[in-house]
Amino acid sequence: MPTNYLLRTAGPEDYDALGELIFDAIHNGPTQYTPAQSKAWAPAPRSGPDWAERLASQHIIAAEQGGEIQGFMSIEPGGYVDFAYIRPGAQGSGLFRQLFEAVLDRAKAQGDTELSTHASLMAQPAFAAMGFEIDYHETVEVDGQSLPRARMTKRL
């Protein structure tokens, strides 16, 4: 049964916590990537001015429980879902669906006709369950490591 979370818009005061959550999800959650791939993907928690600049143009929905962010999803103008991360202890609780429904509402409100993302191996099944289809598979190189992912889209 899904757990209830407080969904809210995240702001600059949350950016460091979001960076730490990504690091936690990549290094401590279920993975299909090697330790070297995970280290290349997230060598340290993201923070600082470059991180803030990356997030500033996105609408970010954070899910809190007990005063701690358990997951978040972001959408850019135009319908690109840039981030979708769930803390390992909250995975399987229905949180991905709750966050996605909030992002979907935002996409419709901003007039998007399609959502798109580049999904990791772990995220692909969750996005597929929300109606996304794989357009193509690709591999990106990060710090000497090859990271497979898929471009996925959903028509609205």
Image (cartoon, rainbow, N blue to C red):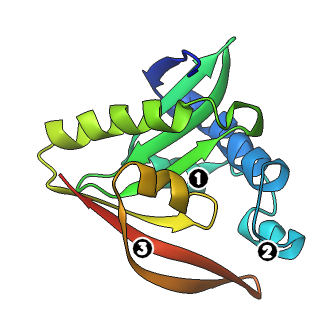
| Relative vertical location of residue 12 with respect to residue 67 in this rendering, above or below | below
Which image quarter: residue 102?
A: top left
Q: Quickly name the residue at label 2.
A: 37
Residue 40 spot, x, y in % from top left: 78, 72
User: Which comes sooner in the sequence, label 3 or label 2?
Assistant: 2
Q: Residue at x 75, y 62 (%)?
A: 42
Q: Residue at x 52, y 85 (%)?
A: 138
Mark 1, Cα crowd under 10 Å, few <14 / some 14-19 / many 20+, is some
Residue placed at 31% from the left, 65% from the top?
A: 153
Q: Nearer the viewer, residue 127 or 18?
A: 127
Q: State if disc 1 and disc 2 touch (CB < 8 Å).
A: no
Q: Amino acid at mark 2?
A: Gln
* Residue 88 in the image, given as x and y percentages of width and height: 75, 40
Mark 3 or mark 1: name the one nearer the start of the chain: 1
**Residue 43, image quadrant:** bottom right
Residue 51 tag number: 1
Question: Could you tell me which secondary element the residue under label 2 belongs to?
Answer: helix
Which disc is residue 151 wearing? 3
Q: Earlier in the sequence, mark 2 or mark 1?
A: 2
Amino acid type of disc 1? Trp
Work out how far the residue at label 3 is from the one at label 2, CA to CA, in angstroms: 19 Å
**What's the distance in space between the residues labelled 3 and 1, CA to CA?**
23 Å
Question: Residue 124: percent from the left, percent from the top?
Answer: 52, 62
Of all residues shown, which one is farthest toward the top?
66
